[in-house]
């Protein structure tokens, strides 16, 4: 969808109207002459709302401080009429009361402009909460999660040791040409395919949720200490973004309507470093016991695929060691509605030969100035296996849908492990 140009940029609520004229033209039977004569008639003249503009008054303030702001624009982009062919032939004498003419009717008379919106409100509320949580995690700057790692340290080290011993035995047997023994070492026994699949699933899950996160934690710890050593400013900034789109389509009273929308939310937070020691502990994941309890809960990572509880719990302590400076949340929504009439036979004497075309577009922008750190809220991951951006708490990175392949592999491995 392209940018919607406003018909005016003046502050206030403004409405633009435009006229419509519906006509009929053709031939009809004339009783006086007994012949078909030309026919032309103006059926209706009316006005419709063709554009809306909403803009707040000009507000003079410190340009460095965020203020609330709302802007909305709506326009009819196209409105071509429905064309109907009305016709009748007297079955007795073939001429009496005959008529044959075309008539027009605008869709903007059948559909009140800007009266409905295809935007899914609950989904946009979810997008809002997701962007806020991302900004909180971003300003927190957590690079590692020793709280979680310490809780799982014993099992992780055991998994690493077992994997190392299995790998060493596999390599040794392969070098000696002991192919069957090498396969058995990995649990790949052709005689028992289900057991082989389950063993492969166990190896993958051990890698994904065992020693890889521990190794990543150890690697990222040095980044935290490097940041402490090389930090040259007390200013901290966090950003979060989330977006969604959707389509709705339905038919009513012969009209075929489709609505498309897309919306995005961006959250920006700024703060100053107040307590470097507390912030460092927070970055190391040692100040939030709730996240540790959640991470050691069995299969919590599966819940996080659909409802990122871990991310929300982590975001709740984002402000530790920081002093609030300022922030804002902006939301932009674009939407479009297109309507046309179904063509074909409408009655025995009326055919719709042209369904017409109606299109309206709207665009809104909202900015909310924040007075303090926003609250972290639970949100749903609407694309657990792709189709959107998501935050993976294990490697503490945002990924697009292409990275969701590993999540799908984890799901399949889990199913194989649980299946008997």
Image (cartoon, grey):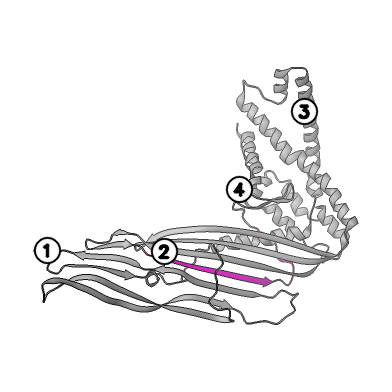
Mark 3 or 4, which is nearer the eye? 4
- Is residue 21 shown above or below 409? below
Disc 3 from disc 4: Cα separation: 32 Å
Q: Residue at x 38, y 72 (%)?
A: 109
Q: Residue at x 56, y 67 (%)?
A: 3
The tally of labels here is: 4
**Closer to the observer: label 3 or label 1?**
1
Looking at the picture, tell me which residue is in the foreground, 397 or 290.
397
Q: Can residue 263 be spotted in the picture?
A: yes
Query: To which residue does mark 4 refer?
Result: 386
Which comes sooner in the sequence, label 2 or label 1? Answer: 1
Q: Tell me where residue 22 appears, x and y as whole percent.
A: 33, 74
Q: Please name the residue that numbered disc 2 is placed on.
A: 339
Earlier in the chain: of badge 3 and badge 1, it is 1
Few, some or many C-alpha atoms within 10 Å of disc 4 (few <14, some 14-19, many ≥20)?
some
Name of the residue lying farthest toward the top: 177
Q: Which residue is mark 1?
A: 94
Residue 24: which quarter of the image? bottom left
SS of the residue under disc 3: helix
How far apart, in angstroms, are the residues tagged by discs 2 and 1?
38 Å
Of tags 2 and 1, which is closer to the observer?
1
Residue 167: mark in rendering: 3
Mark 4 lies on a secondary structure that is: loop
Q: Position of residue 306 (x, y in %)?
A: 62, 50
The alpha-carbon separation of the residues under discs 3 and 1 comes to: 94 Å
Residue 102 pos. (x, y %): 27, 68
- Residue 397's tag is none
Q: Secondary structure at mark 2?
A: strand
Tag 3: Cα neighbours inside 10 Å, few (<14), some, or many (≥20)? some
| Residue 413 percent location from the top left of the image | 64, 36
Q: Which residues are magenta?
A: 356-378
């Amino acid at each position: 969808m392209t940018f919607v140009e406003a018909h005016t940029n003046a502050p206030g609520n403004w409405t633009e109207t435009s006229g419509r004229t519906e006509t009929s033209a053709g031939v009809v039977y004339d009783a006086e002459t007994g012949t078909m004569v030309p026919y032309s008639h103006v059926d209706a003249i009316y006005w419709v709302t063709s554009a809306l503009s909403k803009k707040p008054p000009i507000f003079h303030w410190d340009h460095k401080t965020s203020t609330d702001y709302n802007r909305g624009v709506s326009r009819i982009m196209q409105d071509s009429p429905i064309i109907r062919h009305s016709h009748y032939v007297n079955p007795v004498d073939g001429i009496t009361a005959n008529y044959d003419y075309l008539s027009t009717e605008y869709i903007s008379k059948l559909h009140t402009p800007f009266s409905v919106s295809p935007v899914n409100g609950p989904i946009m509320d979810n997008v809002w909460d997701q962007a806020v949580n991302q900004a909180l995690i971003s300003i927190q700057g957590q690079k590692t999660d020793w709280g979680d790692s310490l809780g799982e340290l014993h099992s992780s080290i055991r998994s690493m040791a077992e994997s190392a011993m299995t790998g060493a035995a596999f390599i040794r047997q392969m070098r000696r040409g002991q192919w069957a023994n090498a396969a058995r070492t990995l649990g790949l026994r052709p005689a028992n395919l289900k057991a082989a699949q389950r063993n492969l699933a166990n190896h993958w899950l051990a890698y994904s949720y065992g020693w890889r996160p521990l190794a990543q934690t150890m690697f990222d710890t040095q980044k935290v200490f490097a940041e402490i050593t090389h930090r040259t400013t007390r200013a901290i900034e966090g950003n979060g973004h989330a977006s969604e789109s959707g389509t709705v389509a339905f038919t009513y009273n012969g009209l075929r309507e489709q609505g498309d929308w897309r919306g995005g939310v961006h959250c920006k937070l700024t703060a100053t470093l107040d307590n470097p020691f507390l912030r460092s502990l927070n970055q190391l994941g040692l100040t939030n016991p709730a996240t540790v309890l959640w991470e050691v809960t069995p299969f919590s990572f599966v819940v996080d695929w659909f409802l990122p509880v871990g991310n929300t719990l982590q975001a709740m302590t984002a402000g530790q060691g920081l002093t609030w400076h300022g922030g804002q949340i902006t939301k932009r929504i674009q939407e479009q509605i297109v309507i046309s009439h179904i063509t074909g036979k409408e009655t025995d004497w009326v055919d719709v030969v042209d369904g017409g075309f109606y299109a309206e577009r709207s665009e809104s922008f909202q900015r909310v100035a924040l007075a303090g750190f926003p609250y972290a809220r639970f949100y749903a991951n609407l694309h657990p296996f792709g189709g959107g951006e998501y935050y993976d708490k294990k490697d503490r990175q945002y990924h697009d849908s292409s990275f969701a392949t590993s999540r799908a592999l984890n799901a399949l491995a889990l199913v194989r492990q649980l299946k008997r």
